[in-house]
Amino acid sequence: MSQAALRNVSLEIEDGELVGIIGPTGSGKSTLIQHFNGLLKPDSGKVFVDGVDLTLKDTQLRLIRQKVGMVFQYPEHQLFGETVLEDVGFGPRNIGLSDEDVIQRVREALAYVGLDFEAIKDKSPFELSGGQKRRVAIAGVLAMRPSVLVLDEPTAGLDPEGREEILAEISQLHNDGITVVLVTHSMEDIARLATRLIVMDRGTVALDGTPVEVFREVARLRELGLGVPEITELMHELKARGLDVRTDILTVPEAEEEIIRVMGWRK
């Protein structure tokens, strides 16, 4: 007997948001995001991108996928070109751009992910470090100049340095005007980056709000097998021990300021 992966999901993502999607394994996160550019189509209901109904037979999904770029888990596994230039330039070349325009797209995309075009363009992507491979794979999506970037666990398997590099670049892309949807298991990462959080549970939207609003629901999140950022846990513990601190703290700098305020210390 088949079971619906998503049920009664209704949501709207606005231009310029950085939306985090969290939830336990099997909650429907990856299934949900694959509807955002027509990789999957719903059995019932509608999906719209900029007013275009993705469920209609005559919708040109190729154009939608240029607009909504998708980066899957371990995107470096999809690298195939002999050189970085060939790999990142595949999409632009495939839509008929001139060699000059392709090179410009590749140069621009590599710059976005912090890689030097001249230093890396002729290298094999398979000779690069894990973090560099990940960034080249993301550059291949950015070379299509999407207005929306959807990333599924983009830091999975990276060392701390590579993870921080990817997160900094995602933040910069958002600051540059790209709408970002980020699936992650890291409460710390999403608390730091997201403007909005969607919590999935068994194919439904369990919570939807700002990070402060969502992480306030500690008991509900624990019911779902999720946590809150470690620094938020600390503030709850301090509150339980009698220190009159705010518990809607999500980052270390915020916690530092709050503890100094409550203790009456001077910085």
Image (cartoon, grey):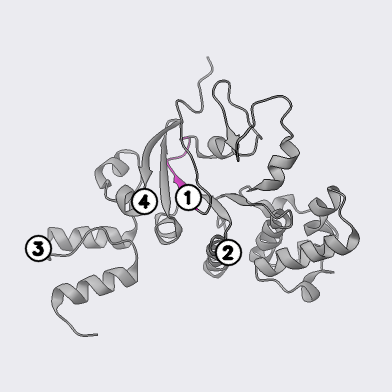
The residue located at (45%, 26%) in the rendering is 8
First in sequence: mark 2 vs mark 1: 1
Q: Is residue 145 above or below residue 46?
A: below
First in sequence: mark 4 vs mark 3: 4
Q: Is residue 255 left or right of residue 104?
A: left
Judge whether residue 180 can be spotted in this image: yes
Q: Is residue 132 above or below residue 93?
A: below
Residue 221 lies in what quarter of the image?
A: top left
Disc 2 marks which amino acid?
Asp
Q: CA distance from mark 1 to mark 3?
A: 34 Å
- Label 4 element class: loop
- Label 1 element class: strand
Q: Tags 1 and 3 in contact by the CB under 8 Å rule?
A: no
Q: CA distance from mark 4 to mark 1?
A: 9 Å
Give the residue at mark 3. Answer: 242
Disc 4 marks which amino acid?
Thr
Disc 1 marks which amino acid?
Val
First in sequence: mark 4 vs mark 1: 1
Q: Tags 4 and 1 in contact by the CB under 8 Å rule?
A: no
Percent position of residue 105, x then y: 78, 62
Q: CA distance from mark 2 to mark 4?
A: 21 Å
Which dot marks residue 19?
1
Give the residue at mark 4. Answer: 210
Q: Name the foreground residue: 206 vs 130.
A: 206
Give the residue at mark 2. Answer: 176
- Label 3 element class: loop
The residue located at (53%, 50%) in the rendering is 15
